[in-house]
Image (cartoon, helix red, strand yellow):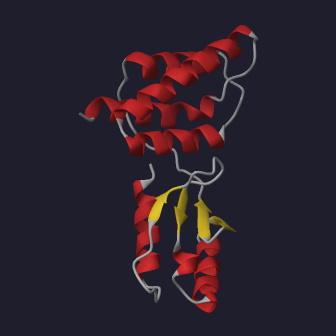
Amino acid sequence: MLTPLRKRLRELMAEMPCRRPPVLRRSDAQDMLLATDLPLLTEEASLSALLSRLEAEGWRTRQERGWLLLDHALEAPPCTGEPEGEGACVLRLLSLHPGGGMDEDTARLLARAEEQGPRQTERLLSDLHHRYAAMLRLHLPLPEELIPYVRHAALRQLSQP
């Protein structure tokens, strides 16, 4: 899910005059997807031009301690197939009591976990399974719009070694 966004950022940063190639990594901030040290490596005018361009493309940005934090809406990934294990359990729970809409923070967590590999994805799916089961016992609506994100992450997890 993050790969196309990461690729686009790399393209834009490659056009920037920098002292060295900037780092681009997953953000530690829960509300942001990616982070780069670009502000430390380029002139303020170049950075301002890039920020304007990013905002025009739908990016949300914030600067913290020399880092540029970036977020973008994640598109629901198209995928077919039925996952196994925790992924199947989470999908079943989400379909049992819909009405909670979308949970952007969890979509970000799924995208990050998917990039980190199968273990992290399995750990997150297990956490979601427990969280949604507890919500279901309290008759709270679950964020059914997460279904394509969960399916995608769970199927990718199964296909990775």
Q: Position of residue 156 (x, y in %)?
A: 34, 36
Q: Position of residue 48 (x, y in %)?
A: 64, 84
Give the residue at x 66% y 50%: 31
14 relative to 7, above or below: below
| Front residue of this view, candidates 125 and 99 | 125
| Front residue of this view, candidates 146 and 159 | 159
Task: Say whether residue 95 is visible.
Answer: no
25 relative to 54, above or below: above
Give the residue at x 40% y 80%: 14
User: Which residue is situated farthest in the front direction here?
Assistant: 65
Q: Is residue 21 left or right of residue 47?
A: left
Task: Say whether residue 140 is visible.
Answer: yes
Residue 101 quadrant: top right
Q: Is residue 129 left or right of residue 62?
A: left
Q: Position of residue 130 (x, y in %)?
A: 59, 16
Residue 4 quadrant: bottom left
User: Which residue is situated farthest in the left direction here?
Assistant: 161
| Front residue of this view, candidates 127 and 67 | 67
- State the quadrant of the C terminus: top left
Q: Is residue 34 left or right of residue 119?
A: right
80 relative to 9, above or below: above
Give the residue at x 49% y 26%: 125
| Front residue of this view, candidates 35 and 1 | 35
Q: How many marks?
A: 0
